[in-house]
Amino acid sequence: MSAASMDLDALIEDDYENDHDDEDDGMAVRDQATISKENATSITSPSSDMLKKSSLRARWLVLSLACVVMTGSYYAYDIPSALHQQLQDYMPQSPHFETQFNLLYTVYSIPNVILPLFGGNIVDRCGAPACLALFAFFTVLGSSFLSVGVAAKSWYIMYIGRFVFGLGGESLCVAQSTILSEWFEGKEVAFAMGVGLAVSRSGSILNNVWSPKIANDARIEAAFWLGASLTGISLFLAGMIIVIDRRAVKKIRK
């Protein structure tokens, strides 16, 4: 407010020195007041909050948590492909096994033909952290249904699990990308996105190593339940991101 007052005084002095009439003075003052109000509004706008988040050290913690959230999702997604042979030996013998197996990925893809578009709209309306937790919840629920289906040797329950998993799987990526764009700016955005993608994909690598070993050394159900457990951890970490984000916003607005 003091800066705005100084600008107004300088403007008025310039007007008097240039012998402007009173009407011009009034218009200049009103214009200056309007600009001052716009500047005050921009300071408290959401975009300003986003820019200031990038100056907090907590952004690196948010990046780490967001990466692990996606790691659990990628791990659970790729379990069927890593256990293709084990599933063929475990499930009831059928000449249509390949068709039944491929349907696990088909039913996952069905909701994701359209959902990412709606997922982006939901993220814009409700906020990325809350949506990250919501989509993570769908992956937990879907992975749990899939594990129950494997234990019951029921393809139909497994299909339900994969469909529910698909409700959150791809939209989870949308929410993660939005969070990183809010917490990072400039050159750091590309770096954060790259780290997020690299670390997230490590879930697929770990799955290809761990799942066959667990299925062969223990039981195939254990391999699927491990994936469900990891998505549960992802949900917990998504909740932590919500807490960190809310505290950051409160700190900025003080």
Image (cartoon, rainbow, N blue to C red):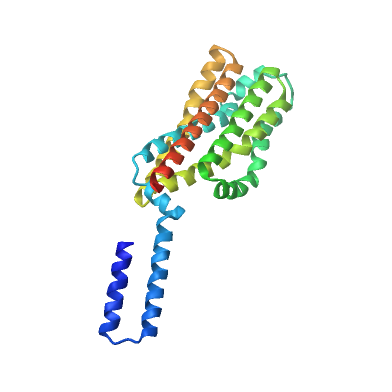
One can see residue 166 in this view: yes
Compared to residue 108, the image places residue 29 above or below, namely below
Q: Nearest the camera: 197 or 67? A: 67
Question: Which of the 4 quarters of the picture holds residue 202?
Answer: top left
Residue at the spot x=51%, y=30% of the render?
A: 234
In the image as oriented, which residue stretches furthest toward the top?
A: 218
Q: Is residue 190 visible?
A: no
The structure residue drawn at horizontal position 32% and vertical position 86%, both measured from the top left corner, is 20
> Quadrant location of the N terminus?
bottom left
Residue 122 in the image, given as x and y percentages of width and height: 59, 47
Residue shown at the point (58%, 17%) measured from the top left: 222
Q: Position of residue 247 (x, y in %)?
A: 43, 39
Which residue occupies the foreground of this view, 198 or 5? 5
Q: Residue at x 74, y 25 (%)?
A: 95
As rendered, which of 95 and 24 lies closer to the eye?
24
| x, y percent for residue 210 | 50, 21
